[in-house]
Structures are given as C-alpha cells and as structure tokens.
Amino acid sequence: MEKIKIRGLALLLANLFIAWGVLVGAKSLYDLFAGEPEANAYSVKPWTFVTRDQWMRYGGFELAYALSCLGLGAACRRYSRFLPETIERPKPPAPDFFR
C-alpha cells in the first residue's frame, strides 16, 4: 500500500494560485498607476503607439486576471478542508521496461 497526500496537493495548488495572483496584482497596480508601455521609450512623442486608454484597459485586464487567480486560490484552500489528509491505495505494478 502507498500513501498519497491529497490535502497537500490541493493546498499546493492554492498556494501557487495565490502567489501568482499577488505577483500579477502588484504588476497590474504598478501598470495602472505608475508604469507606461515600453513603446514610449522608443517613440518621438510618448503615447503615440499605445494610447493611455489602451494601457488602462491592459492594466484592468491584468487586475481582473490577478483577482481571478486569488479567487481560485481561496476556493482551492476552502475545498481542501473537505479532503482527507491522505489516502491509501495498492501499489501499481512496475512497467515491464523497468524490470
């Protein structure tokens, strides 16, 4: 018999979603309030290639994506409460190419 940690897998997934959501959220807040597109550094007049409206729409999409990642992480964390800590199952036989 082998033990498989079920709750730990759900918590790992939740932590990954939350960490990614925090990173993307921080970048989106920077883009919305302080950042500007890289195209501004290469153009003669800033905001010609990418307009401010387009940049705000992009930052809003990033923020929505970050909030959805945080929501998925919270949902996975909440769902993990209902899972057993470990389960036991019989060990599967080794494939022929490993013998």
Image: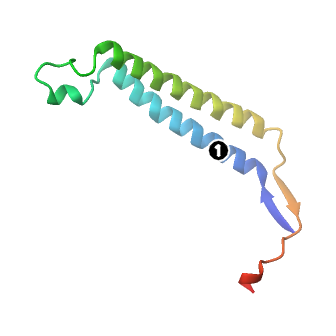
Q: Quadrant of the N terminus?
A: bottom right
Side (left or right) of 54 relative to 24? left
Looking at the image, which residue is at 52% across and 27% down?
65
Side (left or right) of 15 relative to 50? right
Q: Callout 1: helix, strand or loop?
A: helix
The residue most toward the front is 49
The image quarter containing residue 40 is: top left
The three-letter code of the residue at mark 1 reads: Leu
96 up-or-down from 32: above or below: below
Side (left or right) of 61 relative to 77? left
Q: Quadrant of the C terminus?
A: bottom right
The front one of 47 and 34 is 47
Q: Could you say where residue 57 lies in the image, as x and y percent from the top left?
A: 41, 17
Q: Could you say where residue 34 lies in the image, as x and y percent from the top left?
A: 29, 21
Looking at the image, which residue is at 10% across and 23% down?
44
38 up-or-down from 60: above or below: below
The residue most toward the bottom is 99
Side (left or right) of 14 relative to 23? right
Colour setting: rainbow
For disc 1, the marked residue is 13
The front one of 57 and 87 is 57
- Density class for disc 1 (Cα within 10 Å; few <14, some 14-19, many ≥20) is some
Looking at the image, which residue is at 77% across and 82% down?
96
Q: Could you say where residue 47 lies in the image, as x and y percent from the top left?
A: 22, 18
Looking at the image, which residue is at 64% across and 44% down?
13
